[in-house]
Image (cartoon, rainbow, N blue to C red):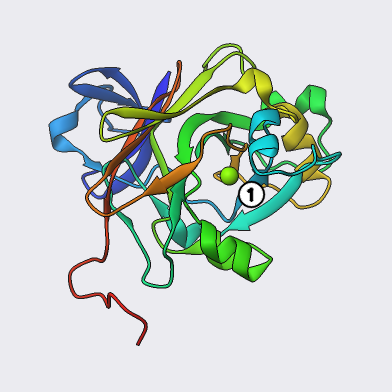
Amino acid sequence: MRIIRVRHKGQAFYAAIISPESVRPLNREAGQPEEIPLAELELLSLVRPSKIVCVGLNYLDHAREMGQAVPEEPVVFLKPPSAVIGAGDAIVLPAQSEQVDYEAELALVLGRTARFVAEADAARHIFGYTCANDVTARDLQKKDGQWTRAKGFDTFCPVGPWIETDPGDLQDMALRTVVNGEVRQEGTTANMIFPPHLLVSYLSHIMTLLPGDVILTGTPAGVGPIKAGDEVSVEIDRVGFLLNPVISARPGEPTAMQ
Ligand code: MG
């Protein structure tokens, strides 16, 4: 099932896509129609996380390309919720960076609060899966030594275009990044070091994961830069296709440090 978040007659809710033209509200309120045409809906941000937890160096091939040892435990960092944008929204290159990279990642969305969850129970806490781009100012990541600035700019967390609730085998998914129609990054979740259910368990022993929280599960080898005017898409088999244009600044925003 493919799920989106929408507003209809002032009400915001999650809905399942049931045809190219219509959706069905997930938890129907009294008086709500069973089927609503897409044309009557306003599309809303897919997720409203309290936090976005990311895992670095979680693919064998990417750890090698970065010249890093294979981690013994997940390498964890956060992106702020303010970084989230949706499918079609622009990634804005910040004036502070000379090199901004794409990173295609399988993201999972929490459906239930998770605290001290065993790996075998993790699936019950996952609402579904979507595509994410862990956009990274690579030069600032190296310069700062820790990653908050490099990973935390507004628009640096494209997520979408929908939540797929049943994507099949999580450890057999091809994922790729396409820039201006050219494949730049290609990998498979089979190379993931710490798989999604293990990550939910591991993270739930650190912090309470809330419904709507998002976990980015790492990127395979082949990361590289994007520039203004590019169109970058993250594509994951059986999950979806997330396309975002890249711009240097929004109208009215500064293009240099002030
Ligand atoms: Mg990443």
Q: Position of residue 62 (x, y in %)?
A: 63, 35
Q: Is residue 176 left or right of residue 226?
A: right
Q: Amino acid at mark 1?
A: Val
Answer yes or no: is residue 209 visible. Answer: yes
Q: Please tell me which residue is depicted at 80% across the width and 41% down the height of the picture.
A: 69
Q: Which residue is mark 1?
A: 53
Q: Please tell me which residue is depicted at 71% across the width and 43% down the height of the picture.
A: 67
The relative height of residue 65 versus residue 140 in the rendered view (above or below) is: above
Which of 108/231 is in front? 231
Which of 131/189 is in front? 189
Q: Residue furthest left?
A: 39
Which quadrant would the C terminus be assigned to in this image?
bottom left
Residue 141: image quadrant is bottom right
Q: Residues within 10 Å of mark 1 (few under 14, many from 20)?
A: many
Residue 3: image quadrant is top left
Q: Please tell me which residue is depicted at 26% across the width and 42% down the height of the picture.
A: 88
Q: Secondary structure at mark 1?
A: strand
Q: Is residue 217 left or right of residue 102?
A: right
Q: Quadrant of ligand 1?
A: top right
Which quadrant would the N terminus be assigned to in this image?
top left
Q: Position of residue 10 (x, y in %)?
A: 25, 50
The answer as to whether callout 1 falls within 8 Å of ligand 1 is no
Image mark count: 1
Answer yes or no: is residue 28 visible. Answer: no
